[in-house]
Amino acid sequence: MTLQIEKVPGKEKAAYFVANIGQILFQGTLNSFLLIFYTDVAGLHPAAVGTLLLVARIMDAFSDPIVGYILDHLPATRWGRFRPWLALGGILTGLNLWLLFAGPLLATSLKLLIAYITYLFSGIVFDLLVIPLVALISVMNKDDNERTKLATMRGMGTLLGGILSSVLTIPLVNLFQNEGTGWLVVVGVFGSIIAGAAIIGAVNVKERVQAKEETPYAASDAFRILLATPPLWNYFLNYILFNSGMNILMGALVFYFKYNIGREELVGAGLMGLGLPMLLLIPLTPMLTRNIEKKWLLFFCLLATSVFSLIRFFIPNPGENLIWVILTFVMMGVIMGPSAPISQAMIADLVDFADWKHNVRAEGIVSSITPLVTKFASGIGGALPGYVLAATGYVPDAEQTPEALRGIALTTTVIPFAMMVLGALVLFFYPLTKVRVQQIQEDISLREGQLANELS
């Protein structure tokens, strides 16, 4: 049975691309700069910040499936099921970004408590932004190639947001005589971009795949979907291991450039070396996935990326060999290009698998895996560098001991390498191939056709 496919117009793909800029602008700013802002500007202890980033992320991770379940059960509006929440999530996330920095900085006491409250709140508003963004891939179209193109737009949007964050943040902050004022202005601008990008996406995309008309699934079904869908757990392990490695690297990178290299202002160059090749090469993803299984292409990307992360550890005197340091980031960016869209396209496959196995169309609950894993990875990525800094004797804004410099180097090379390799190896057991997903979609279409005939 051949599925009839309506292609997604270029205007919608462009709007979806824009909508995704805000997510990584928020996430990238937190992952790359929140730790050093809290320690070097707000004056919080690195170990206390590490605990905050870990505990808060674990606590609010439970909100992800709850928000996904709620979104699946809210009545569809004339705007669709996910688009209104995308707009609201963008507005709240933009506001929360400013509060995350302003709260601990402006408070005269209870700085750590305020950091906990604003960071916990960020987990909920982040869900309202990310779950609709991920779910839209599966509801905008059924075709595997069209979904891969949408996932490519998502990957390009997130990379552009990441480049904006990594390249512009420190130079813009440095334009201000008062560092604290600089941070508040910059994150205020970023927050406005996040809200505007989400609204543009929500207004201009279309939801084509409708939820089943029967009674929505119960809470017990939500647990069944999450616990009894083996490919979902495989995806979970892969995503959390690799992204934890990347977040550990990102969380310590500004420290690496500031102390190991002695050129804090060049952190943007390193992140540009990583992000720009990815942005340029991501459009090749749909072509590559036509001939290569998604899981094997992703396996190669993750494994090769980990190798170049490790190579950087063996570069002697990184401040004097900066070109080789930047080159490792460039090579990581070249290889990682297809990884982001492939991971997002896999979510759409998992939605279909859950529908086929459990007879439930649950874009929200399945898509909640993405922010859940992102939060866990963000917590690990923020906590571990904080603990290593504290254990190796790091002192903010001072000349670091050889032990502290080695600790910073380990968190940007060896530790991410180990996490990424484990993430790649998990993919050996991922069962969904292109042929299998097509069979599942045809089975679902046949089942729905038989049901329609019985009802008529």
Image (tube, rainbow, N blue to C red):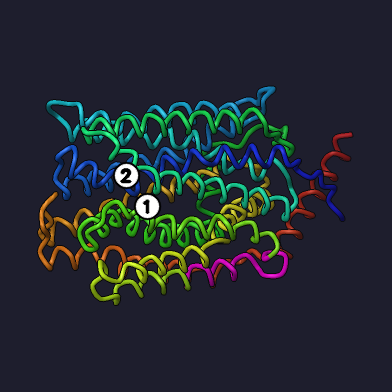
Residue 12: where, in percent of width, then height?
70, 38
Q: Badge 1 is on which residue?
A: 268
Q: Is residue 345 above or below residue 57?
A: below
> Based on the displayed image, in which of its 4 quarters is residue 385 positioned?
bottom left
| 178 part of magenta stretch | no
Label 1 amino acid? Gly
Q: Quick one: 374 or 19, which is closer to the camera?
A: 19
Q: Quadrant of the N terminus?
A: bottom right
Q: Tell me the chief SS of the magenta region.
A: helix
> Based on the displayed image, in which of its 4 quarters is residue 78 positioned?
top right
Q: Residue at x 26, y 70 (%)?
A: 320
Disc 2 and disc 1 in contact, CB within 8 angstroms = yes
Label 2 amino acid? Ile
Q: Quick one: 357 or 343, which is closer to the camera?
A: 343
Horizontal side, residue 455 vs residue 219: left or right? right
Q: Residue at x 22, y 59 (%)?
A: 262
Q: Quadrant of the C terminus?
A: top right
Residue 75: where, in percent of width, then height?
63, 25
Does dot 1 land on a helix, a strand or a loop?
helix
Which residue reaches farthest top?
Answer: 78
Whether residue 170 is visible here, answered yes or no, is yes
**Label 2, label 1: how far apart the Cα atoms are:** 8 Å
Residue 426: where, in percent of width, then height?
48, 69
Q: Is residue 409 above or below residue 221?
A: below
- Which region is colored magenta? 288-303
Sequence-wise, the earlier of marks 2 and 1 is 2
Does dot 2 land on a helix, a strand or a loop?
helix
Q: Residue at x 51, y 47 (%)?
A: 160
Q: Is residue 420 above or below residue 168?
A: below
Q: Badge 2 is on which residue?
A: 170
| 294 part of magenta stretch | yes
Horizontal side, residue 405 vs residue 210: left or right? left
